[in-house]
Image (spheres, rainbow, N blue to C red):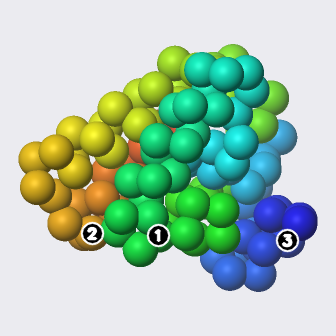
Amino acid sequence: MDYGAYLKKNIGDPPKDMYDPHAHHIVFKKGNGKAQKELVKEGQEILKEYDIDPILGLENLVWAPNRVKGQHGIEALRNVVDNLKKVRDAGGDRDDILEMLNKLGDIAKRRK
């Protein structure tokens, strides 16, 4: 699937000044290696608890630079999953999860 075309159709073009933009899954689609794959599974399960499709849900997709340091590293993924767990474990509702996804998406957008 062309996630860039999907995101463009649904929210518009990437920012003109963004380096190497791509449709970025805040909670990654797959992950590289065993540790990332486990975190991806955990993060995707949390999204599903809040009726968010982890692959096609626009709540989990943002325009972000692709080939920049840390964008797809385990530290970034761990930060995403840890923050989603904090919201869930504190009794957060769907709006709280969406607010956290927006914050985490903003971090991804700003990586250089």
- Describe the element under mark 1 as helix, strand or loop: loop
Q: Are marks 1 and 2 in contact (CB under 8 Å)?
A: yes
Spot occupied by residue 99 in the image (x, y as percentages of width and height): 30, 59
Spot occupied by residue 89 in the image (x, y as percentages of width and height): 16, 45
Name the outermost residue toward the bottom: 9
Instruction: Report the residue marked by disc 3.
Output: 5
Spot occupied by residue 108 in the image (x, y as percentages of width and height): 56, 39
Front position in the image: 35 or 66 = 35
Q: Which mark is residue 94?
A: 2
Instruction: Report the residue marked by disc 1.
Output: 52
Q: Residue at x 34, y 32 (%)?
A: 82
Q: Using the rendered view, name the quadrant where residue 67 is placed.
A: top right
Asked if residue 112 can be seen in this view, the reply is: no
Q: Amino acid at mark 2?
A: Arg
Q: Are marks 3 and 1 in contact (CB under 8 Å)?
A: no
In the rendered structure, which disc, 3 or 2, sits on the residue that comes first in sequence?
3
In the rendered structure, which disc, 3 or 1, sits on the residue that comes first in sequence?
3
Front position in the image: 69 or 53 = 53
Name the outermost residue toward the left: 90
Q: Is residue 27 left or right of residue 55?
A: left
Q: Is residue 11 above or below residue 1?
A: below
Between the C-alphas of marks 3 and 1, the distance is 20 Å
Front position in the image: 16 or 60 = 60
- Describe the element under mark 3 as helix, strand or loop: helix
Q: Residue at x 27, y 69 (%)?
A: 94
Q: Residue at x 33, y 45 (%)?
A: 84
Spot occupied by residue 77 in the image (x, y as percentages of width and height): 53, 30
Q: Amino acid at mark 1?
A: Ile
Count neighbours of disc 2 (C-alpha within 10 A) and say few if under 14, some if 14 to 19, many if 20 or more. some
Q: Amino acid at mark 3?
A: Ala
Quarter holding the N terminus is bottom right
Front position in the image: 37 or 81 = 37
